[in-house]
Amino acid sequence: MSPTNTPDASLRLVNAVLLPGFHGTEPPPWLLDAVDAGLAGVVYFAHNVPDPKTAAALSATLYARRADLIVASDEEGGDVTRLEAATGSSYPGNGALGEVDDTDVTERVARAIGHDLRAAGIGLNLAPDVDVNADPDNPVIGIRAFGSDAALVARHSAAYVTGLQSAGVAACAKHFPGHGDTAVDSHLRVPHLSADLDLLRRRDLLPFTAAIAAGSRCLMTGHIKALPFGDAPASLNPEATRLARQELGFTGAVVTDALDMGAVLADPGFGPACVQAVLGGADLLCLGNPASAEAAALSYATARDALLDALATGVLPADRLTDAGRRARELADWIVAARATPPPPKEDALPLAVARTALRVRGKVALGPAPYLIDLRQRVNHASGSRSPHLNRLLTEAMPGLTATGVPPEGPTATRADTALQGSADRPLVVVAREPHRDAAETALLRELIARRPDAVVVLTGWPHAVDALAANTVVTYGSGRVNAQAAVERLLGGTPHRRLSGTHPRGFTPGSGAAAPPAPRRKRDSAR
């Protein structure tokens, strides 16, 4: 048996492409054994890093085991955070950054996020999301995108990559070749992107091209069936990787989206998906977020054994694993070198200033005492894993006597409104919504509430087109992070508008007003689709 065909060598070839999740705040024995046997790295989820001190201690333990381990996490800012899942992100997300539309600000925010990741021992951020949100009904991207205009998304994608990597944290542009023009959540089932190659080049690929030109160390493939690539999702499809490498010139590591997601879990299944992803050109496999300690160990063992079997039977060439492992090591080497450099200074005041600037306020929004809050948000965002209750919590803390309630999940619109309004009497009314335009029943309920209470203030955490035609008094936050909520609460408490961060002004902004005039509803900008 040659040295390259020994069981130990095969295991190291396979481990070199795996990024498992694990359960808890301490590495389990199976994970440490895998690290010793050449594991590429790990991905942190919220349950691994409940606070910064715990995150730093966990990373120190892992790096003590092996200094070149890749430690990754999702820290987009706004709606998606792991380090601040319990309290909400202290950084505005892409939607707010795109609304402010100042690339210097985006670069600085990304650098600040990188500062926090460095302190937590995280060397790879599975961000930014560079999708062009072309479909306003998109259930999983939405406010996570910089916007629906490809040129805007491209320039902010490049700025984010530059800022994050200047902090010594590798960036990962996602979800290739574009998840923005889809109407299905890939956490649940496979979305279809119907754009032809010409439209992809003119729209969806522009931000990836910009991120690659800015030096993004990684690119994440999505579980998306794109028309030009045939039936296999991009994450398992060699045509997608070929496009990224040969046409876009990407030379870094290709990382899959989580392989425990519904889009690939049912078909082809977890183990086969791992094999197909490597055959399709992936260099690192994100195995996903385990529900338990037992599930984590099983997930890793299933992926490992599937790859070992494919390698032993010749289905998976050793050369493909060797090539993938080389790119993974190049990424790890970059991270090790970056960790040796001093982190950038922290701009503590920046995130709230950005969130304040991004607010779009219309009508009379200052609340009187003891308001009544109705939260229409019932759908859990699978990317963030929560309904983001930070606005409710901050208002409750700031306004003694506030009453917060939800709505019945089903029933006639009038009955649901009756139930929601019980106890509101003549109190100031706040209605919180995220994406009412995606749900006819939620839209109908919002209309009913506003018809009964025209004085209601609607706080929208998504895009403004969802309420432009519905409500006279609105606060649009462009995100559900804690810092977005804090900026909104200031205005609801009667705070004055804040000056913008730079001389650039978004659509409809009147200098000095601190608020934007209502623009035309956002819609799909590319008429060619």
Image (cartoon, helix red, strand yellow):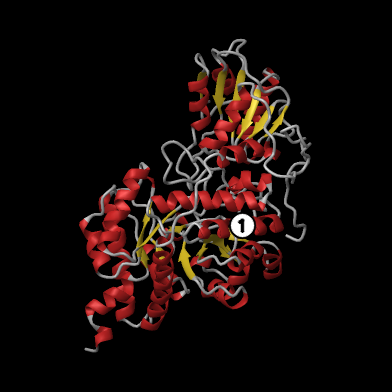
Q: Amino acid at mark 1?
A: Ala
Does residue 474 appear left or right of residue 93 in this picture?
right
Q: Would residue 408 be seen by someone viewing this image from the given angle?
A: no
Q: Is residue 478 above or below residue 458?
A: below
- Is residue 394 in view? yes
> Is 475 in front, or is 102?
102
Residue drawn at x 54%, y 52% as measured from the top left: 110
Q: Quadrant of the C terminus?
A: bottom right
Percent position of residue 457, x then y: 65, 24
Q: Compare residues 33 and 504 and report the one nearer the observer.
A: 504
Q: Could you tell whether 102 is left or right of 424 in the image?
A: right
The residue under the point 43% across, 74% down is: 327
Categorize mark 1 by other alpha carbons within 10 Å: few (<14), some (14-19), many (20+): many
Residue at left 24%, top 86%? 3
User: In the displayed structure, does residue 67 sit left or right of residue 515?
Assistant: left
Name the secondary structure under disc 1. helix
User: Does residue 32 lie above or below 198 as drawn?
Assistant: above
Q: In the image, residue 78 lies at what x, y percent?
A: 54, 43
Residue extending farthest to the top is 426
Residue hosting label 1: 159
**Rendered view: 25 above or below 21:** above
Which quadrant holds residue 370? top right
